[in-house]
Image (spheres, rainbow, N blue to C red):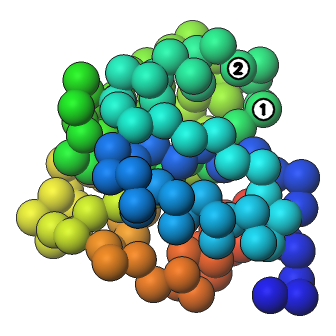
Amino acid sequence: MEDKFLEGKTILVCEDNALNAKVVSYMLQQVGACVMQVSDGGQAVEVFTQTEEGQIDAILMDVHMPVYSGIEATRRIRSQERCDAKTVPVFALTADVEGVRQEALEAGMTGLLAKPLDMKKMYRVLEEELRG
């Protein structure tokens, strides 16, 4: 892609499937993103907690992961006492969009992206959210 709309943006990719994580990370890097990658919900919460406020621009969160599910990890991120915890966009990654939609949104997720991921849709959703 010519448009580097994610240039300089930091995206936290939370995905326990190594191949999926590698593909998503690569595709984000192709549009200029800096990618932080974790493989379980506990790591997602830990990394978010340890970064400076505002450092992470968006989170792509697999729903079904070890330690904490993506939904529980999102709840834990949203409950933190820091300004960006309530506002950082968190997108669920799931093959069961309709089955988890309500719970994901109630946990504070911004939206859901269906697996297998449509990369053009992922780019569009991130661009809309991050460009405002």
Q: Position of residue 41 (x, y in %)?
A: 35, 30
Residue located at (35% from left, 32% from top): 40
Q: Position of residue 53 (x, y in %)?
A: 75, 22
On-image quarter of the N terminus: bottom right
Residue located at (74% from left, 63% from top): 29
Of 41 and 108, the residue lying toward us = 41
On-image quarter of the C terminus: bottom right
Q: Amino acid at mark 1?
A: Gln
Instruction: Relative to 39, say whether 63 is above or below.
Output: below
Evaluate if marks 1 and 2 touch, with contact meaning CB atoms under 8 Å apart. Answer: yes
Residue located at (41% from left, 77% from top): 117
Residue bearing mark 2:
51
Instruction: Relative to 91, say whether 128 is above or below.
Output: below
Q: Amino acid at mark 2?
A: Thr
- Alpha carbon of mark 1 to alpha carbon of mark 2: how far? 6 Å
Residue located at (88% from left, 74% from top): 4
Q: Quadrant of residue 101?
A: bottom left
Instruction: Relative to 95, say whether 121 is above or below.
Output: below
Is label 2 in a helix, a strand or a loop?
loop
Q: Quadrant of residue 36?
A: top right
Q: Position of residue 100 (x, y in %)?
A: 16, 58
Q: Residues within 10 Å of mark 1 (few under 14, many from 20)?
A: few
Q: Is residue 87 left or right of residue 34?
A: left
Label drawn at residue 55: 1
